[in-house]
Image (spheres, grey):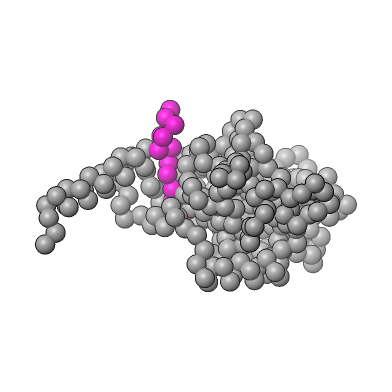
Amino acid sequence: MISLAFFKASFLLQFTIIASFLLAAYAGNFYQDVAQTFGDQRFKILEGGQLLTLSLDKTSGSGFQSKNEYLFGRFDMQLKLIPGNSAGTVATFYLSSQGQGHDEIDFEFLGNSSGQPYTVHTNVYAQGKGGREQRFRLWFDPTTSFHTYSIVWNPQRIIFLVDNIPIRVFNNQESNGVPYPKNQAMRVYCSLWNADDWATQGGLVKTDWTLAPFTVSYRNFNANGCVKVPGSSACGSTNSLNNDQAWQTQGLDAKGRNRIRWVQQKFMIYNYCSDATRFPQGFPSECRGSRF
């Protein structure tokens, strides 16, 4: 028989977890979950809070941020990108803290000329240091329908996913002296802006402003993570024994490893860990022995 002491211990463990974390899952309503950061009327919430659009013209782009800050979690957003000639534009979905030594986990979508594929740019900053770029082409047209882009961030690793297919993993290698984002809470940010000095073919192709305004659509924002309590360095407490908490220890199983190999073999177009010209004195320490 299971003893009363076991039940008491189990209850105490659950209470301790709940008292330490607010593991909240949001099947987002943009009115409730985000705040505009810039762009005036170029930021629009539609369909009762289920759809959000950002626009870019020659005067300004636009953007928003989550109202909550998070310390680890899984973050999903569906995007439909600019159709046709999107050269010079950058749409984003990323996590970031603030300050000089900030942490950041980036999805950036670099526009291109009509008929050319989008470039998905990923990067990880820890304690203010980035430069860990990997870039990919997509295996579908991201402008004709919505697709899901996800960031899993836990103490062991960061996983970037597209339609639940992993494309990149950044592992915690603090034991090798590599900084890892784990102490600073981050908000979710999304934006659309002009970067035609570098975004498309290294800045060779400029934004065609006769096609403006450019518009990106967002929907189905989901954040399942540890919500930071305002005014505290810790996460808050309440309600979520029933939430999906797989993100806390999520890694790659055999199927995930096969999928990420497929993506990186067929669709990766840049990996800083393979750029010998950039690192003539040797690759960064996190690149050594890294399979992904």
Does residue 60 lie above or below 168 as drawn?
above
Residue 53 on image: x %, y %: 61, 51
Please say if 116 is above or below 96. below
Quadrant where the N terminus sits is: bottom left
Residue occupying the point 74% across, 50% down: 283
Residue 214 appearing in the image? no
Residue at 57 percent across and 48 percent down: it is 173
Q: Position of residue 30 (x, y in %)?
A: 50, 47
* Left/right of residue 141 with respect to residue 6 in the rendered view: right
Q: Nearer the viewer, residue 112 or 136?
A: 136
Location of the C terminus (image quadrant): bottom right
Is 30 on the left or on the right of 24, as rendered?
right
Q: Residue 88 location in percent, x, y?
A: 79, 50
Total labels drawn? 0
Q: Residue at x 84, y 52 (%)?
A: 277
Please tell me which residue lies in front, 289 or 268: 289
Q: Residue at x 56, y 44 (%)?
A: 174
Q: Residue furthest top?
A: 231
Q: Which residues are magenta?
A: 222-235
Between 2 and 120, the residue placed more toward the observer is: 2
Instruction: Determine the image quadrant of residue 159.
Output: bottom right
Give the answer, above or below, for where 36 lies relative to 89. Answer: above
Question: Can residue 129 be seen in this snapshot?
Answer: yes
Residue 230 in magenta? yes
Q: Is residue 209 left or right of residue 286?
A: right
The image position of residue 250, as x and y in percent, is: 47, 58
View extreme (right): residue: 204
